[in-house]
Image (cartoon, helix red, strand yellow):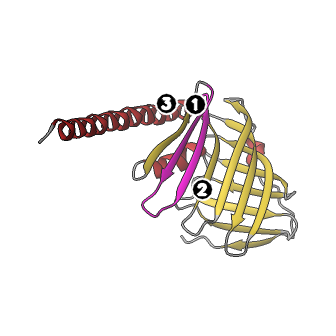
Amino acid sequence: MNYKENWRILSFLILLISYSFSLFAQNDILNKIHLDLIEKYDSIQTYEADFIQENFWKEINTAKTSYGKIYYDSSFLLLEYSEPEGQKLLIDSLSVTIYDSASNQVLISNKNDYELKPISIISDFWINSQKKMIKNSENEVQIKLITPENEQIFVRIKDNLIIEIQIVDNSANMVKYSFSAEKINKQLSQEIFELNLPEDVNIIDNRQF
């Protein structure tokens, strides 16, 4: 084996070792980010923010943008939409209730594994997904997760708060939530989580007991 061949092998080994250390370092950073997120959200008793929800359905090539307010505490989570106006989604410990004022209809179903809290969505995907750092600056972190089902989850984090989650399934359908104007641990009146429904509302109850 000549000098040049030895040098090529040595260079390859150095590159491989450097890449391996880079992966280990990135994994350490990602794990710390995840632990910091959990610690931050464990400290949140109440949460209020503005949100924008963007949906795209690939098969029918249709996009929709909605927005409103999100509130949650230890027992409830509410999405109160300004657009479409009069629509609400309420999650409690047992059920999911969707109210649409335009159709004067309520749909109730079992909660099962339905989650909308930002940290719950991330934690559901974190363990079994491939993780990649897209951006890591002083002000913002961006992470990409790829699930075993080939779903892609893009997460933007600022000050240990999730400010954007985008989920793209393996059919290229997309939903994205963006959060802003967050208010943490501000006292929330329980009246916020009360759905005052019209007496003539049409109720469709799909819960299984």
Q: Please name the residue that numbered disc 2 is placed on.
A: 167
User: What's drawn in magenta, residue-wise?
Assistant: 139-160
Which label lies toward us, 3 or 2?
2
Task: Check residue 160 in the rendering and tell me which mark sits there, or answer none.
Answer: 1
First of labels 3, 2 by sequence position: 3
Callout 2 amino acid: Ile
Q: Please name the residue that numbered disc 3 is placed on.
A: 36
Callout 1 amino acid: Asn
First of labels 2, 1 by sequence position: 1
Q: Are marks 1 and 3 in contact (CB under 8 Å)?
A: yes
Q: Quadrant of the C terminus?
A: bottom right
Residue 138: quadrant of the picture: top right
Mark 2 crowdedness (10 Å alpha carbons): few <14, some 14-19, many ≥20: many
Q: Position of residue 43 (x, y in %)?
A: 55, 29
Magenta stretch encompasses residue 147 = yes
Residue 158: quadrant of the picture: top right
Residue lying at 49% horizontally and 30% vertically, measured from the top left: 36
Q: Are marks 2 and 1 in contact (CB under 8 Å)?
A: no
Q: Quadrant of the N terminus?
A: top left
Asked which secondary structure carries label 2, the reply is strand
Q: Is residue 131 left or right of residue 74?
A: left
Which label lies toward us, 2 or 1?
2
Q: Is residue 9 left or right of residue 32?
A: left
Give how far apart the Cα atoms at labels 1 and 3 are. 7 Å
Q: Nearer the viewer, residue 171 or 97?
A: 171
Q: Is residue 122 left or right of residue 55?
A: left
Residue lying at 86% horizontally and 66% vertically, measured from the top left: 199
